[in-house]
Image (cartoon, grey):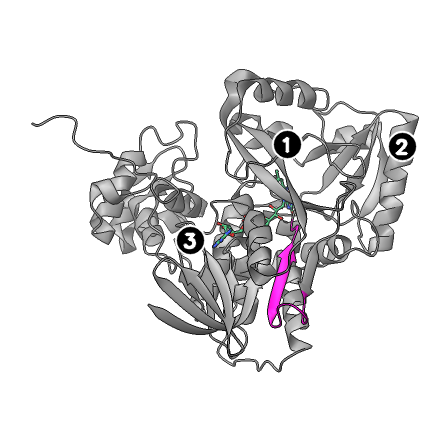
Amino acid sequence: MLYYTDVAVIGGGVIGSAIARELSRYDLSVSVLERNPDVVCETSGRNSAVVHGGFAYDTGTLKARLCVEGNQMMDTLSRELGFPFIRCGKVLVGNTDEDMEQLERTMAQGFRNGASGLEIIDGSRLHELVPAVNGAFALFSSRSGILDPFLFTIGLAENAAENGVRYFLEHEVERIGREDGRYLIASGDDLFSAEWVINAAGLGARRISDMLGITGYRVIGSKGNYLVLDKRLSSLLPMPVYPVPSNTYMGIHVTPTVDGNVTVGPDAINTDDFSYYGVPSDKMAFLQESASVLWPHIRRRDVIRTFSGILPKWVDAEGRIQDFRIEIRDDIAPKAVNLIGIESPGLTAAVPIARHVISLMRERTELHLRELFDPVRKASRRFASMSDEERGMAIAEDPLHGHMVCSCEEVTEADIIAAIHNPLGVSTITGIKYRTRAMMGGCQGGFCQMKIEQLIEKETGKKAEDVCYMRSGSWLLAGKMRKA
Ligand SMILES: Cc1cc2nc3c(=O)[nH]c(=O)nc-3n(C[C@H](O)[C@H](O)[C@H](O)COP(=O)(O)OP(=O)(O)OC[C@H]3O[C@@H](n4cnc5c(N)ncnc54)[C@H](O)[C@@H]3O)c2cc1C
């Protein structure tokens, strides 16, 4: 099939979806081409979920400027898109004279970058803020925070879709050509004819850049592994605790999640394999040992899950890590915005990155605002977040709120059904998990996963053997085991 679109955004992660949502403010047809069956299958769902303050990046870089801007707008975004965001603060903990010098340098850099709410605090104030931490003093950043990275990305994507953006899931871009001033983008049997192309393909961005003819970028993967700890530890960790950073690496930290778990990580291992997310057991032991120096409450029995993410780092010929690259190469690929090396703090900076992309486009073309843009995502409230009185009313209105599907996270059948009917048309198991938190509790889906699979069948008319876990081809059921 041949589709015509004004703008084709390649990649539907937090960056592609932020760009799509910002573009939907304008009078344009926008299509997002995403190779996975959902928008949080890669880096945007695999990170520390920290809203950074903007002090850790060299002054004058895009990373510094866009991070500070992203931090400032997060309260508004959280209200509009309905994702949990907590401005809980964060501490970088030190012990030695060298640590103090590095923290003072980091704070001064933060002020130069426009970050606010930074102060060096002594041990007693540190232990008031985080009683269970080891350390003599800290840099405290009161403006840092944590968010739900799944619902942030999903919120951007679903709000973009509500404002007219078309998502083409399971559409991997394989070739890009140019004919009569338009791009021709091939994905399976489909062709997209687009005036503009935006390369927001994350770990796949170098390949797309090559397809556009913008060659020569060196991008290395840095894999970070994590442990997820049970919610019973949440009271011991009111905010993220980091070690003193180096210039290139923030170090293994312990971070509360917005839902009350604790994550431990990441380490940083260079890799060429951009698709392997397994966490080896020796890395688990290493994370536990390293982070226990800061926060000595990590027990193997509290680990309920592991995960990992891979940062795409653009490096120069000497291997030095570079800034975000956001460019239009008029000489090689006019009307193509190329984003390379969107590593941390990409989550924090996603919307300012999107606005920067649009400012580059507006230097070359006129864009007209639409009156009908609605910034508020239309999502129903989760049963788990309601008061007892609200729960009673919700059950009276929809009795399916009286059927508990996931008891660990208090997710009802009505929550699951609402998630299955999402505006993107996602119907994978993890698609429902990330929208509702079902299967994220202590039993990790042991009790509810198959109930959710059956609800997907019932609501979408899919056959059991066609329901996938996360990626295309990750079928849950392979065939019949017994005849009767
Ligand atoms: C370990 C780790 C910790 C981090 N911690 C933080 C943090 O605490 N705070 C913070 O601000 N940032 C953090 N980040 C950075 C942040 O997660 C990323 O910058 C951000 O998620 C990048 O988003 P993206 O949309 O570019 O990438 P992705 O989410 O990977 O999206 C790119 C999309 O492009 C799709 N794609 C690729 N190739 C193709 C193709 N050929 N055709 C179609 N689709 C394609 C992929 O399927 C993918 O969905 C962290 C990252 C990692 C790995």
The quadrant of the rendering that contains the N terminus is bottom left
**Nearest to the observer: residue 388 or residue 404:** 404
The kind of secondary structure element at disc 1 is loop
What amino acid does circle 2 point to?
Met
Q: Residue at x 45, y 72 (%)?
A: 193
- Name the foreground residue: 166 vs 352: 166
Q: Is residue 377 visible?
A: no
The stretch drawn in magenta includes residue 424? no
Q: Which residue is mark 1?
A: 266
Label 3 is placed on what type of residue? Arg
Q: Nearer the viewer, mark 2 or mark 3?
A: 2
Mark seen at residue 363? none
Q: Which residue is mark 3?
A: 381
Q: Earlier in the sequence, mark 3 or mark 1?
A: 1
CB at disc 1 and ligand 1 closer than 8 Å: yes
Nearer to us of marks 2 and 1 is 1
Residue 81 lies, in percent from the top left, at 52, 59
Q: Main secondary structure of the magenta part?
A: loop
Q: Judge whether residue 335 is colored magenta.
A: yes
Residue denoted by label 2: 100
- Locate residue 163 relative to residue 297 in the image: left or right: left
- The quadrant in which the C terminus is found is top left
Q: Position of residue 292 (x, y in %)?
A: 68, 20
Mark-to-mark CA distance, 3 and 1: 32 Å
Q: Which residues are magenta?
A: 328-342
Q: Alpha carbon of mark 2 to alpha carbon of mark 3: how far?
A: 45 Å
Please state which amino acid type lies under the numbered disc 1: Pro
